[in-house]
Amino acid sequence: MAEKSAQVGNAKLLSAEESAKAKAELGVDDFQDAVEDVGDGVNTFDVSVEEMSIIRAELACEFPDDYKYLSDAYIESVASKPYSKDMSIRRPLEYSIEKLSDVMKWRDENGTPTLKDMVKIANGPSNAPEATENYQHYERCKAVTTALNNGSLYWHGLTKEGHPILWIRCNRKPWYPDVDADIKALIILADIGISCMPKNITDFVVVSDSTSPPPPIPTFMIELLKVLVKGYPDRLHLLASAPVSSIIQFVMKLLLPLMPGRLSTKIHLSDVEGIREKLEKILPNGKDDIPTFFNGPVNHDEFYPDESYCSKKGPGVLKFDFYGMIERLEKARDDFEAKSASSN
């Protein structure tokens, strides 16, 4: 039985050596100390206006083109937590600045602030200057946009509390993905979700329809975890997935030993009935907002159909309703904030 659980198809669990290497690349211990390993329900500490200004100034000085990416709410959520080495005190200011700077360095190293431009380039004509000046980059732009086209990932709506929801349709994922393009597409989507968060919301929810997932690719799964850990620490509020297949069990066996702190406690695996109960609690209109792929009344395919039903959005290769998704998410945020303001 143990041997069966160690392999699905050609995918195998990591050896002890491979696991240690992956943990080192992820910086798990450092990340635990930085964000996750403080537990739920702990007291937080006040962060003064002056201290917020100091953090902002440090980030603006080191990352002048991207420092506004981190909202005040997120900065305060990181800086206000207890220090894991002494839970009776707040994290030292220098420590919080260092950890926030690590996130910004990761963004800079991965070219994250300009990744969204790849979709614009790929949606344009092939003879446009930005396409012809660097053919290799243009080909990568098309690959990233093609990774979006299958509609396996999209933002749609907010929870009752205002968390943007990223929906995953596993049966639309390709069996043999372009790992680099898929990861870049995910980063683009993550940045969109964060940019559309209501005021004082700092994390998002992921809901996965895990019916018929493709065979697991360990390198892709580890890269995915690396993005979440190093690029988006403390951004995941909840990941709910159903149903639970042998492939999903394998993925969890692969990733759980590599996950930092309480990240694993945010993952909820269940059958379809279990996820329906979860969604009824978190969606604004309860069961009336549950999508058809979880036996609910809402048809997401109205906005995000299978790629075979999509037409191009411009002269390029984009078929996915990328810009419509952003407009709908921005409207959901604006409606949420207006409703919150009127109730106060």
Image (spheres, helix red, strand yellow):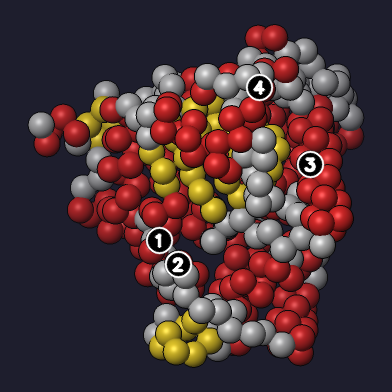
Asked if marks 4 and 2 touch (Cβ < 8 Å), the reply is no
Can residue 185 be seen here? The reply is: no
- Observer-side mark, 4 or 1, equals 4
x and y, in percent, of residue 93 in the image: 60, 87
Q: Residues within 10 Å of mark 1 (few under 14, many from 20)?
A: some
| Distance between the alpha carbons at the discs numbered 3 and 1 | 29 Å
Using the numbered discs, state the Cα–Cα distance from disc 4 to disc 1 in whole angstroms. Answer: 32 Å
Per the rendering, the mark at residue 332 is: 3
Circle 4 crowding by C-alpha within 10 Å: few under 14, some 14–19, many from 20: some
Q: From this viewpoint, which residue is outermost toward the front?
A: 343
Q: Quadrant of the N terminus?
A: top left
For numbered disc 3, what is the local secondary structure? helix
Q: Position of residue 245 (x, y in %)?
A: 32, 26
The mark that comes first in sequence, 3 or 1, is 1
Residue type indicated by callout 1: Arg
Whole-Å distance between the Cαs marked 2 and 3? 28 Å
Circle 2: is it few (<14), some (14-19), or many (20+) Cα within 10 Å?
few
* Tag nearer the camera, 1 or 2: 2
Q: Which of the two residues, 251 or 263, is positioned nearer the viewer here? A: 263
* Contact, mark 1 vs mark 2 (Cβ under 8 Å): yes
The answer to which of marks 4 and 2 sits earlier in the sequence is 2
Please, which residue is most extreme toward the top here?
309
Give residue 262's mark.
Answer: 1
Residue 92 left/right relative to 21: right
Disc 2 designates what residue?
Answer: 40
For numbered disc 4, what is the local secondary structure?
Answer: loop
The amino acid type found where label 2 is placed reads Asp
Q: Residue at x 42, y 65 (%)?
A: 27
Q: Which residue is mark 4?
A: 298
Cβ atoms under marks 4 and 1 closer than 8 Å: no
Q: Residue furthest right?
A: 128
**Residue at 43%, 73% in the rendered image:** 38
